Image: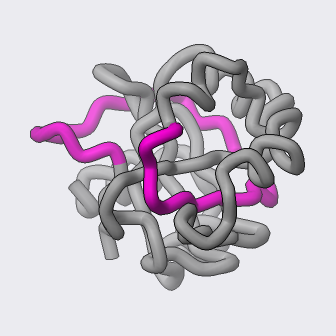
Amino acid sequence: MYKQIIKNLENQLLPKELNEIKNTQLHLGIFTEPYLTYMLDGKKTIESRFSKNKIQPYDQISKNDIVIVKKSSGNVMAYFTIKEVLFFNLNETPIGRIKLKYSKELCVDEDFWISKSSSNYATLIIIDEIVKLNPFHIDKKGMQTWIKLK
């Protein structure tokens, strides 16, 4: 997938931008609607991942990493740089505290919080800058919603 993404980016980015991506830790995130549109429109400024176990991206991403944004069952749409990342053990930090502090930036509703109530871990990814791309297809198999590419 990495080579496929880089090949597509070669046609869309300046050499300097492409080199930055090649020299940075790269991740592929899968995003669903309406959150993808909120992110692309700049309304959603924090992405979250909740899980029962310590799975990606929990504790495996850092500030300045780059996330390739792929629509669920669709194309790559954009990429963004991580401004900051916060990791929470929800057995130590109540999910309600995260809800109070970050709901607006996450652009989520009450049903979202109910669906995440049995999670043990949370990763909050503050988006620095999102760059929209001409959408392109990549061959991704499996159900993973987060993949460390390089």
Residue at image point 66% right, 36% down: 132
Q: Looking at the picture, does residue 109 appear above or below residue 58?
A: above
Q: Quadrant of the C terminus?
A: bottom left
Instruction: Indicate yes or no whether the magenta region holds residue 138.
Output: yes
Q: Looking at the picture, does residue 109 appear above or below residue 14?
A: above
In front of the other: 85 or 135: 85
Q: Quadrant of residue 118?
A: top left
In front of the other: 127 or 129: 127
Residue at image point 77% right, 42% down: 99
Q: Position of residue 16 (x, y in %)?
A: 65, 73
Residue at image point 51% right, 50% down: 49
Q: Position of residue 135 (x, y in %)?
A: 47, 27
Q: Looking at the picture, does residue 9 appear above or below residue 133?
A: below
In front of the other: 125 or 72: 125
Q: Which residues are magenta?
A: 117-145
Direction from residue 24 to residue 63 in the image, left or right: right
Direction from residue 43 to residue 136 in the image, left or right: left
Which residue ends up furthest to the left in the rendered image? Answer: 141
Direction from residue 105 to residue 23 in the image, left or right: left
